[in-house]
Image (cartoon, coloured by chain):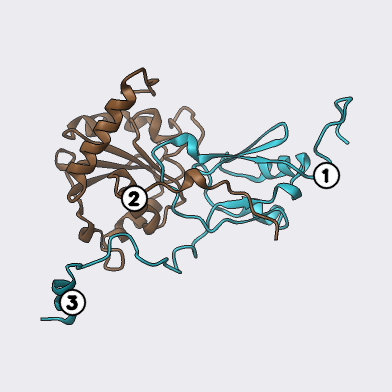
Chain colours: A cyan, B brown
Amino acid sequence: MPLWSLQGLRRGVVTTRYPARPDPAAAAPPTPPAFRPEALTRDLADRLVAVCPSWALTRSNDTLIFDVGACTACGRCRAEAPGAVTASGEFELATTDRAQLVKRIPLLGRNVTANYHGKSA
Amino acid sequence: MTGQVAPGPGVQATADELRRTVARLFGRSLHIRTLDTGSCAACEQEIRLLAAPHYDLHRLGFFFTPAPRHADLLMATGPMIRAFDNAARKTYQAMPGPKLVVATGACALGGVYQPDAFTHGGVGEVLPVDVWIPGCPPSPLALLQGLLVAVGRLAEKVRDLDFIQERE
């Protein structure tokens, strides 16, 4: 009888369920981006929206709306603005609620906030 | 079957009860039928890898079945092309209840393809989706997490993620 069978019989555990320890290889494939709000301006956000090939990004005033479900982790936004966008490393993204996958990123970059006269500074 | 129905009063309690029933019934044995609704087959590649020794899906009580009549869970990939409407509905109707639908991959979740004359642009337009698994394609571990979320054996994680990088 193989050793692991004996161990399984003794401990009552044949296999683990979900990986008991983090799997270092799991985050190696491309993952959706994470954003730095301080580095994001309206102009930059519009550029990111324009390069996204899968309609995962839209901008609504001073918010970048990121649909994680639509993201293909292609990395084009990361190539467009390496200082503002990085890989999140997240892959356990399954959810029972589609709305949970839509994330709102505030745009806190310098030329974002409109002044009292409604003009961009 | 088409479209999402807004939950009324009392529906939440029924949904919770159904969720418990599903967890009890499917916790140890669940048969999966995959449904390709026009995908590029990258999702199928990753789904196939679930049965390979590294992930070994069968140890968790999940099995693939070729017949929808034997399936508890429909794993739908692709953007749901319109030519496939009839087949998708028939597949869903052939499954015995209670049944789950898992939308797999960015196409199935409404990315990549916008609705047009050829595609609905998402599985949710035609089938009632229970679990959404993002990724292009989702890695086998991401699929595994999605399946365990579907049967209530693993908690969701994405709710608490904001995809904002903290400043160092």
Residue A19 rendering spot, x and y as whole percentages = 34, 63
Residue furthest left as drawn: A1
The residue that disc 3 covers is A7
Disc on res. A110: 1
The tally of labels here is 3
Q: Is residue B30 visible?
A: yes
Of residues B62 and B156, the one drawn nearer to the viewer in this rendering: B156
Position in image of residue A62 (x %, y %) = 72, 35
Name the residue that disc number 2 marks.
B154
Q: Residue at x 32, y 29 (%)?
A: B85
Which label is found at residue B33?
none
Q: Residue at x 38, y 51 (%)?
A: B43
| Residue at 19 percent of width and 39 percent of height | B68
| Mark 2 surroundings within 10 Å by alpha-carbon count, few (fewer than 14), some (14 through 19), many (20 or more) | some
Q: Chain of mark 3?
A: A
Q: Position of residue B12 (x, y in %)?
A: 33, 26
